[in-house]
Amino acid sequence: MKVKVHWIIDGVAELEMDSLEAAEAHVDEVLRKVIGENPVLVEEIGARALQGKAYLPGSEDDIDAQENAE
């Protein structure tokens, strides 16, 4: 039987960086290295995208309310 599994890995890294962009770039670099060193993630598990967004501590607490207020 052929079965598809849609999976998501969720995580939050706390980093000391000079900017949000630098933090995003660092995490992207680390994750791409992990994927590159572990081809099973692409070949067997089907990894195909990375997505992330940097934010300042505390600002993530009420994102839905912030978006609805705009």
Image: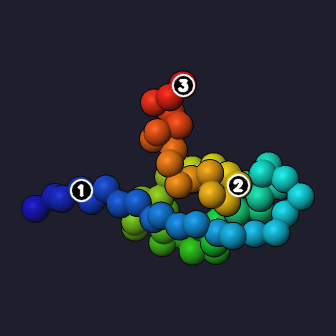
Residue occupying the point 40% across, 60% down: 8
Seen from the viewer's position, the closer of residues 25 and 2 is 25
Lateral position of residue 21 relative to residue 44, left or right: right
Q: Which residue is mark 3?
A: 70
Residue with the most extreme top position = 70
**Can you tell which quarter of the image residue 43 is in?**
bottom left
User: What's the distance in space between the residues labelled 3 and 2, CA to CA?
Assistant: 19 Å
Mark 2 packing: few (<14 Cα in 10 Å), some, or many (20+)?
few
Q: Which mark is residue 4?
A: 1
**SS type, badge 2:** loop
User: What's the distance in space between the residues labelled 2 and 1, CA to CA?
Assistant: 36 Å
Residue occupying the point 45% across, 41% down: 64
Residue type beneath disc 1: Lys
**SS type, badge 1:** loop
Q: Is residue 34 above or below residue 63?
A: below
Seen from the viewer's position, the closer of residues 60 and 1 is 60
Lateral position of residue 59 relative to residue 23, left or right: left
N-terminal-most mark, 2 or 1 = 1
Residue occupying the point 57% across, 74% down: 38
Residue with the most extreme left position = 1
Seen from the viewer's position, the closer of residues 8 and 23 is 23
User: What's the distance in space between the residues labelled 3 and 1, CA to CA?
Assistant: 38 Å
Q: Which residue is mark 2?
A: 56
Q: Is residue 56 above or below residue 33?
A: above
N-terminal-most mark, 3 or 2 = 2
Seen from the viewer's position, the closer of residues 8 and 33 is 8
Q: Is residue 43 visible?
A: no
